[in-house]
Image (cartoon, helix red, strand yellow):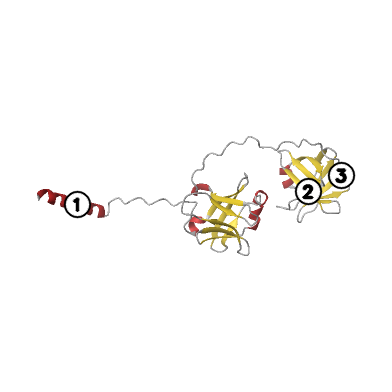
Amino acid sequence: MTRGLRALGLAACLALWLAAPGAAAPAAAAPDPARPRNAAEAAGAWSLSLDGTPRRCVVTLAGDAAAGQTVRFPAGCRRALPIVGRLARWRLEDGALRLLDEANAPVLDFALPETPGPLSAAAASGERYGIAPEGPRAAPPEPPPVIRAALPKPDPRPPATPPEGVSGTYALDRFSEKDTCRLALDVGALRVLDGCRDLGLTVFDPVSWRYDEGRITLFARRGHSVGLVPFGDGRWRRDPETGTTFVLRRVAP
């Protein structure tokens, strides 16, 4: 009898201790930054990438009271990921993070599953994209593999001889500005002529060019390139037409 009373007393004390205000409660699971529960958790910087490639861009899901839920991104993203040029708004609804165009039509629809794993969405073109939190909201990523081959291998083929009228002096035209720079495409050489006032071309820093299969390709010192196709009257435009207007117009030297 005595032992039974003692057991009941201990059980009662334990119950009172667990119910006391100072008793420790089970720790709540920390929210997963890759699976926001509301718009406030979703707002911020996200890293958008094209599956199977190193191309990525940091987009910001803004939640301004005046502008609404808008998508912002650096201008250079249009070149790295052309699809971002269609993004204008975003919504968190029906268990998905949705990136929309100006007409509120879905461009990329990232489902937010309950179990951990990468977020993925398919574009209308069939390409798949991933998205992950960027910045302090994201968990520290694993170190990426070191990629040694940064520059493309040189083309082993000899350059094709450009037809008559391709070599010569060209003016660089932008969307609203004309003749911002002049380039001399000589046989086997490229020269940026004095007086160039185009910051984009200065940063690109072209050092050579090539004509092949009806296209002109300009090569930068760091290995980048820009392809151009003809569109009449001695003019060549960037192909594909992404980012700022880039047109070379043949002029008299």
Give the image location of residue 212, x and y in percent: 81, 43
Decide: marks 3, 1 in contact (CB < 8 A)? no
Q: Nearer the viewer, residue 114 or 146?
A: 114
Residue pointed to by mark 1: 11
Q: Nearer the viewer, residue 181 or 80?
A: 80
For the point 12% across and 48% down, the residue is: 3
Going from the N terminus, do you reach mark 2 or mark 1 first? 1
Which picture quadrant has residue 83? bottom right
Decide: marks 2, 3 in contact (CB < 8 A)? no
Give the image location of residue 179, x and y in percent: 81, 51
Give the image location of residue 100, x and y in percent: 60, 60
- Between the C-alphas of marks 2 and 3, the distance is 15 Å
Name which residue type carries label 1.
Ala
| Quadrant of the snapshot with the C terminus | top right
Q: How many numbered tags mark residues here?
A: 3
Residue pointed to by mark 2: 228
Give the image location of residue 87, x and y in percent: 62, 58
Judged from the image, the secondary structure of the residue bearing numbered disc 1 is helix
Image mark for residue 185:
none
Residue 192, visible in the rendered structure: no
Residue 109, visible in the rendered structure: yes
Image mark for residue 168:
3
Left or right of 183 on screen, residue 49: left
Judged from the image, the secondary structure of the residue bearing numbered disc 2 is strand
- Between the C-alphas of marks 3 and 1, the distance is 96 Å
Going from the N terminus, do you reach mark 3 or mark 1 first? 1
